[in-house]
Image: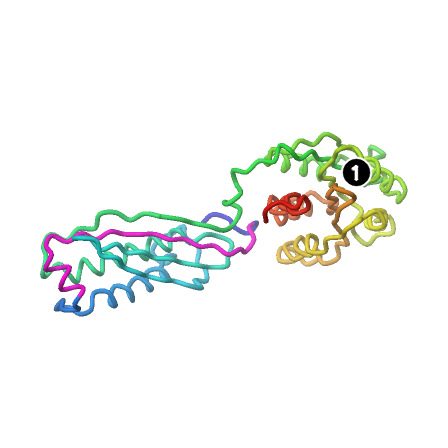
Amino acid sequence: MVDITRKSNTLRTAIATATLRVSKPETIEAVAQRKVPKGDVFEFARAAGLLGVKKTSDVIPDCHPLPVEYTGITYEIKDLTIIISVEVHTIYKTGVEVEAMHGAAVTALTMYDMLKPIDKGVEIENIRLLTKTGGKSDLKNKRFPEIKAAVVVCSDSIFAGKSEDSSGKAIIARLEQLGITTINYEIVPDETEEIRNKARQLSQDNIQLLIFSGGTGLSPRDVTPEAIAPLLDREIDGIMETARRYGQERMPYAMLSRGLAGFIGTTLVLTLPGSKRGVEESMDALFPQVLHLFKVAEGGKH
């Protein structure tokens, strides 16, 4: 199965349809008037479709079991066809499009089975996904070339040349995937005034996104939050709450991170952990959805 452990729970929806075609008007009349010998086609098929949605992961090997929080099955009769619509909702890490299509397929097959004794010309014409929403797929093709970024790594050992930077480079790589250019990349020691001065300078240099990596823990030399906090015009607690919650679900020490986030003027500042894993998890938790802040800050549509 595909590894979805890096994904976050979001509301995900899907609508799928299947079309059943009969060969004579009498079949449609029997369905509509609930006179099919095997029983009420609509209700039997609806019950089967609901079960089909719930059992999708049991019959399709690569589908993850997930909590189905809503399923709606409706019908529309058009001439000699019955259009089946299945809508599924979940709050989970992966989508429900296959569940919706499987539900539509099972519903259509149940109708076919119930109608074949009275109509040998019944056919299932197509099963298709109409819509899906949720997760990062809504934003996967979005690029943000208008955003210019700076990345600052706070580390005594890297600044002294005793170790190599991996976290800052990981941030830059993730930003590149979103079309964001990092126009400034620097390494500074774990010194409050140097970090603070760098934040002041970069926030005045037409930088929209400023990301610090390192110095957010609890060792005596971890001073990045103390350096940045006095400069923030508007702190945004929810950003780091989200990153910590995401991290805590994956390792037991994420709760110890003291990272903070907010605006210095019009520059969004994020303070992320110093480890490569911590940075990658924080980026997974926050991007690209955190970039919506720029639209909100400018008073745009949201």
Secondary element at image label 1: helix
In this rendering, is residue 96 above or below 212?
below
User: Crowding at label 1, few (<14), some or many (≥20) Cα neighbours within 10 Å?
Assistant: many
x 22%, y 61%: residue: 110
Q: Quadrant of residue 210?
A: top right
Q: Which residue is mark 1?
A: 203
The residue at the point 25 percent across, 68 percent down is 43
Position of 1 relative to 29 (above/below): above
Which percent across, then down, holds residue 16? 34, 52
Q: Could you tell me residue 269's position as x and y percent?
A: 75, 44
Which sits in the foreground, 31 or 221? Answer: 31
Residue 40 vertical position relative to residue 163 in the rendered view, above or below: below
Q: Name the outermost residue toward the top.
A: 183
Q: How many marks?
A: 1
Q: Is residue 25 magenta?
A: yes
> 107 or 146, which lies in front?
146
In-image side of 275 versus 292 (left or right): right
- Residue in the image at 18% along x and 57% along y: 112
Magenta residues span: 7-32
Position of residue 157 measured from the top left corner of the image (x, y, whole percent): 83, 38
**Colour mode?**
rainbow
Q: Is residue 177 magenta?
A: no
Query: Of 152 and 130, which appears nearest the observer?
Result: 130
> Is residue 70 shown left or right of residue 176?
left
Give coordinates of residue 78: x percent, y percent: 21, 53
Q: Is residue 184 above or below residue 114?
A: above
Residue with the most extreme right position: 193
Q: Callout 1, which amino acid?
A: Ser
The answer to whether 302 appears left or right of 45 in the picture is right
